[in-house]
Amino acid sequence: MNMSRSEGKRVLPSFTLGRWLFIISGFILFLIVSFVLYVRSADSDYRRAENEAIRIGKAQGELVNVSEAVRHTWQGNVWIVTGEDAGGERWTVFELENEIVRKKASENLTEEQMLAKFAAAHTGKPIRIMPAWFNGQPAWEIRYRNEGDERLQSLDFYSFEDGSLIRTYVLSNL
């Protein structure tokens, strides 16, 4: 018996639409999980340092509730932890390499007071305001766009206690 060419060929199994969708869905899920794990691992050192700063703020800064912990990097790394003590008083704790500096919020300018003082002297809104450590003292750092040239930004450092200007840096085109 003579077989034709088409009868003797083996038919390879083909992927159906359902199989392709299952493979593509699995690959997309793999990409999403990989991205989440990458972001978590890239951020883990910062989160570990932040948790350590909060722990120190509670233990040595006598804070009970922590509302914010930020790292300021200018003349070295300083963690700044803001929160309340057992009596409900707000404090800002500056964690330097060698010491802890505690500042009572009621004896210093708050962020709102500093923003109001800044608004009285400048037009426009600041880009960012944060507590800082500058020239060996607590300070407020305010970043804003220059009034004369919108392409330029400036950094102002103000005294944490009374809001007096310490220093201004004009940054080059960004």
Image: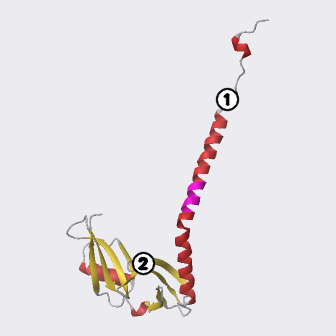
Q: Amino acid at mark 1?
A: Ser
Is 99 situated left or right of 41 in this image?
Answer: left
Query: Where does the image place residue 102, in percent across and percent down from the top left?
Result: 46, 91
Residue 34 part of the magenta segment: yes
Question: What count of labels does the image hold?
Answer: 2
Could you give the CA–CA distance between mark 1 and mark 2, rounded to whole angstroms? Answer: 59 Å
Q: State which region is magenta.
A: 33-40
Disc assigned to residue 14 = 1
SS majority, magenta? helix
Query: Where does the image place residue 143, in percent across and percent down from the top left?
Result: 32, 73
Q: Is 42 located above or below residue 32 in the figure?
A: below
Disc assigned to residue 72 = 2
Residue 162 part of the magenta segment: no
- Picture quarter with the C terminus: bottom left
Question: Which tag, 1 or 2, sits closer to the chain's start?
Answer: 1
Is 165 situated left or right of 73 in this image?
Answer: left
